[in-house]
Amino acid sequence: MNFNVAVIPGDGIGPEIVSEAKKVLDKVGSKFGHEFTYKEVLMGGVSIDAHGVPLTDEALETARKSDAVLLGAVGGRVGVDSWYKLPPNLRPEAGLLAIRKGLGLFANLRPAYLYDELKSACPLKESIADAGFDMVVVRELTGGLYFGERKTEEVNGVMTAVDTLTYNEEEIRRIAVKGFEIAMKRGKKVTSVDKANVLDSSRLWQKVVAEVAKDYPEVTLENMLVDNCAMQLVKDPAQFDVILTENMFGDILSDEASMITGSIGMLPSASLAAGKFGLYEPSHGAAPDIAGKNIANPLATILSAAMMLRYSFDLDKEADAVEEAVRQVLKDGIRTVDIMSEGMQQVTCQGMGDAICERI
Ligand code: NAD
């Protein structure tokens, strides 16, 4: 099959890591008989330098017309690079918000997986790390507290700030459907996280999620309060498969889930729209401190490309092959400098891309 991928290398290490992910996609293509056609899109600092804005309408349109988007990272040294003298809406990171909005990306997926070989980086105690974990946080991305009405005003002589948390049943239903669809491709368990003992929006959340669950009889649904979930993530992370939650809870829990893997260069992510369209990017930033040195870890981006194969192109076998190659590389002791330990073989960013391709 033929797939059109909009590629946004971005800034910092972005071009280096995206180039390795493309190399891996091409290897998948030749092995499994697919063709990936790439259209490069400027976003972030490089777009500011070329066009004065972090994302042009043309760039957004190119992304919209593609089957999926692969993004490296955007941004530079805050307070050092000239981009940060611009007003906030013209800085590199504003491109991220613009593209998420422009492409209607409402579901954010952040997997957290503990590799046997990297267990020593896990900050949890050994008995918990030994059980391993393999979960994905599915977070609603365009509603809730971050998008509600807000104001700060003086009320009876006292400064008072108000933020509003609103969800309607349609917003909840579409993210719940994504959560259950993803569970069907994984361990068939959804933990829906809310604060239904306090919040009306959470009670509506629970009701709608329970309705959606009826369409997925193979998937086990459990409800968990967000405070309990924060505790369970460090006490017994092995219990989770899909954590389905609203915007703010997901913001916090997905960072907590990332942290317990201990290795930022390994964490992929996806943001999905209605249908199969999605934008795939590593969870880390543009790492300007190591840009251009060919030492960045490309695995988070390569694993993001694997997510693209699975969720946008329905190529599960091909995604498995990439994920298995990553496991095999780690088993074979091949490491970039950020995950290097004694007795292992250190490789460059390109060297890691090559090592993955050899194992596909
Ligand atoms: P960062 O993730 O870029 O870097 C944090 C630390 O992790 C750095 O020491 C970096 O060298 C290291 N690191 C990150 N990715 C790595 C990789 N693949 N291999 C090896 N080491 C890696 O976070 P930051 O320093 O807070 O932000 C730097 C810039 O990136 C800022 O301009 C920020 O706004 C931007 N940023 C962009 C995104 C995005 O594009 N989605 C996300 C976060 C930050």
Image (spheres, grey):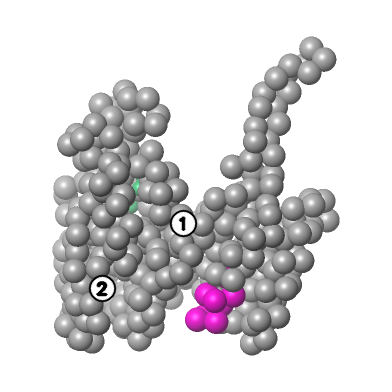
Circle 1: residue type = Leu
Q: CA distance from mark 2 to mark 1?
A: 19 Å
Give the residue at mark 1: 105
Q: Residue at x 25, y 26 (%)?
A: 82
- Residue 10 visible here: no
Task: Find residue 57 and report its horizontal and vertical position in percent.
Answer: 29, 44
> In the image, which residues are magenta?
179-186
Image position of 216 (left or right of 328): right
- Residue 197 visible here: yes
Task: Find residue 6 and report its horizontal and vertical position in percent.
Answer: 26, 60
Image position of 173 (left or right of 64): right
Q: Residue furthest top?
A: 157
13 and 305: which is toward the camera: 305
Location of the C terminus by quadrant is bottom left
Circle 2: residue type = Phe
Image position of 8 (left or right of 200): left
98 and 75: which is toward the camera: 98
- Above or below, 349 relative to 209: above
